[in-house]
Image (tube, rainbow, N blue to C red):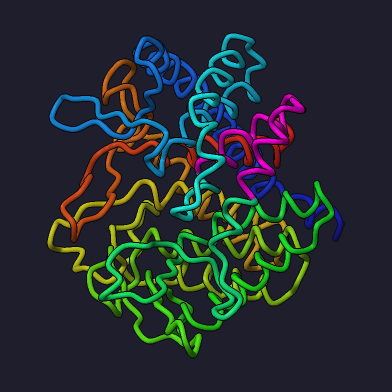
């Protein structure tokens, strides 16, 4: 009798869980189907434009860039994820074509974004095709990125700009480029790549974060002492505020570094960043943050769908490493964010929005640049998050 009662009590939860699982499966599959159709429209538009890649869409106009723009690897990467989900050879050919448009960036040494450019494109391409030619591109890019590391500082320099303001600028975004170095270490066996990545991650962990585990955007180091001389939030509301995308980069970056090293300090850091995001009083009910966590929500500030997409992807992975109840909270937030981003509020209609998938991202509000527009990296991390969730559920 006791066992019967326990079974009856468990039934509502069982049916709720099944319904929720079915609902998420529909969200994921429908979103990936739409993303494929929309991205193929984008590809058709750009194929005749030699070397061009999508950047954003504003005032009825599609803005493109060549490979030099830091976002150049995201559209090819999106196509690779869509190919992974569909096994459509046309998508494979498109992914290969647009990936080739980024190849020259393997020689980039004047900025840190070579990781974004090359790993999101060629890294995904290699993962799915095992094309030997892609290995050379990735290794060359890793060597290029490594030239920006300074032993005196212990970190990779992000920007060369504004030397009167920043002696040696390191931005939290730079955590995302360490995955390229960790790949190079595993592929080549050359420990210097891992040493650089670990040193950079440790330096950022020690100097970029406040007591509540929110992150500054920029830390500039004194080139003589190697110590921080200025801490700012360049693209945020104010220096002491929590710029939403910066928190997303940090969450993703330390989750990735734990995966690659299995060092518990990186898992602890990712968990604490996750708690900051999950518990923040200004996180909207739909899980899509305002462009900065410290702006006044009542002032009609723009949202940043790109931050939600990056967070969702990171939360899905982190949920597999941490213990309950945090694991459950991470996955629940990712599900909420994916549902929100898949809704009419954030997802475009077919053939609209310049053929970008998501609406309502914010590049740099202080710079009045790309505010409340679609962005290629929002689409990339959204499709990555959908793919990760689908793989997690083994659908």
Residue 203 screen position, x and y as percent? 57, 78
Number of callouts:
0
Can you tell which quarter of the image residue 28 is in? top right
131 in magenta: yes
230 in relation to 246, above or below = below
48 in magenta: no
**Which residues are the magenta region?**
117-142
Camera-side residue: 367 or 279? 367
Residue 339 screen position, x and y as percent? 45, 40
Residue 259 screen position, x and y as percent? 73, 58
89 in relation to 254, above or below = above
Q: Is residue 332 left or right of residue 321?
A: left
Q: Residue at x 56, y 58 (%)?
A: 252
49 in relation to 266, above or below = above
Q: Residue at x 42, y 51 (%)?
A: 308
Q: Is residue 38 left or right of residue 60?
A: right
Name the dominant secondary structure of the magenta segment: helix
Q: Residue at x 37, y 30 (%)?
A: 66
């Amino acid at each position: 009798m006791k066992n019967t009662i326990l079974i009856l009590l468990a039934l509502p939860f069982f049916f709720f869980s099944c319904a929720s699982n079915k609902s998420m499966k529909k969200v994921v599959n429908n979103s990936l189907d739409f993303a494929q159709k929309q991205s193929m429209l984008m590809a058709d538009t750009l194929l005749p434009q030699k070397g061009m890649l999508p950047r954003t869409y504003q005032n009825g106009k599609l803005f493109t860039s060549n490979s030099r723009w830091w976002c150049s690897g995201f559209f090819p990467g999106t196509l690779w994820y869509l190919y992974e989900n569909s096994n459509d050879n046309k998508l494979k050919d498109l992914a290969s074509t647009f990936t080739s448009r980024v190849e020259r960036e393997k020689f980039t040494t004047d900025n840190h974004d070579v990781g974004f450019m090359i790993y999101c494109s060629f890294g995904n391409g290699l993962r799915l095709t095992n094309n030997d030619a892609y290995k050379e591109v990735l290794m060359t890019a890793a060597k290029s990125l490594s030239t920006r590391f300074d032993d005196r500082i212990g970190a990779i320099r992000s920007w060369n700009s504004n030397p009167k303001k920043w002696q040696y600028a390191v931005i939290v975004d730079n955590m995302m480029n360490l995955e390229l170095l960790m790949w190079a270490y595993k592929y080549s066996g050359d420990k210097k790549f891992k040493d650089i990545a670990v040193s950079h991650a440790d330096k950022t962990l020690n100097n970029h974060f406040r007591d509540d585990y929110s992150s500054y955007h920029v830390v500039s180091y004194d080139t003589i002492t190697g110590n921080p001389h200025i801490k700012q939030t360049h693209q945020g509301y104010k220096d002491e505020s929590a710029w939403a995308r910066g928190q997303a980069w940090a969450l993703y970056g330390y989750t990735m570094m734990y995966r690659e090293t299995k060092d518990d300090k990186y898992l602890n850091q990712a968990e604490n960043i996750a708690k900051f995001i999950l518990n923040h009083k200004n996180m909207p009910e739909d899980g899509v943050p305002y462009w900065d966590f410290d702006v006044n929500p009542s002032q009609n500030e723009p949202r940043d769908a790109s931050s939600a997409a990056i967070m969702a992807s990171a939360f899905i992975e982190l949920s597999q490493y941490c213990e309950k109840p945090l694991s459950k909270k991470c996955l629940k937030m990712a599900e909420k964010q994916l549902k929100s981003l898949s809704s009419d509020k954030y997802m475009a209609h077919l053939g609209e929005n310049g053929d970008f998938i998501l609406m309502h991202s914010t590049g740099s509000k202080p710079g009045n640049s790309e505010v409340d527009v679609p962005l290629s990296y929002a689409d990339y991390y959204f499709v990555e998050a959908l793919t990760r969730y689908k793989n997690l559920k083994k659908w």
